[in-house]
Image (tube, rainbow, N blue to C red):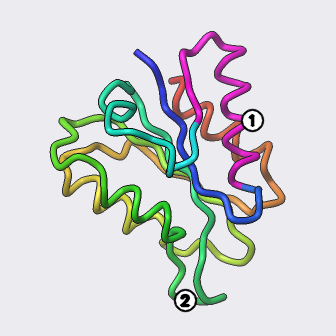
Amino acid sequence: MTHLITYFSHSGNTKKVAEIILEKARKADIDIVCKEVNNVSEEDIINAEKVIIGTPVHGLILFAQHAAKPARDFVKALPEDLQQKEFFLFATYLFFPSNALIGIERTIQEKQGKVKNYVAMHRKKKEELAQAVFELISS
């Protein structure tokens, strides 16, 4: 089965991380595809063994951080019964990530999905973030 990386990227940082993960996975012979959240179909989700979702962190500097609205909307639109499908989440941020991915995690769990792990790093640490996500999905 294939892995699916899907992301929303406002300034290009999250997209770059997704592309680095894609490259690392392909070098490791992992069957993987990468699509922006607005190009993912329900069939893509159903056919994926693992789903990796990337988003920038939006919100105020010290509080009210959250995943970007297109990423939140994507998760809300997922099928209602994800049948324990595995999800991995990652986020890029400028100031503080706070608990930006917790809302997405809750929504996935409410839909019977299983969030295996998530990681957030400063947007300047693209390589490090991609490596961390790659290690999570390849284990």
The residue beneath circle 1 is: 20
Residue in the picture at 63% in, 64% down: 56
For mark 2, give the secondary structure: loop
Residue 135 drawn at (x, y percent) = 60, 31
> Is 25 included in the stretch rendered in magenta?
yes
Is the residue 95 above or below the residue 70 in the image?
below
Magenta span dominant secondary structure: helix
Decide if residue 96 is on the left or right side of residue 108.
right
Identify residue type, mark 2: Phe
Quadrant for the N terminus, please.
Answer: top left
- The location of residue 7, given as percent across then percent down, is 57, 50
In the picture, measured across the screen, residue 50 lies left or right of residue 139, that is left
Task: Identify the residue under disc 2.
Answer: 63
Does 28 appear in magenta?
yes
Residue drawn 80% across the image and 43% down it: 127
Give the residues in magenta.
Answer: 14-34
Element marked by disc 1 = helix
Residue at the location (49% across, 71% down)? 69
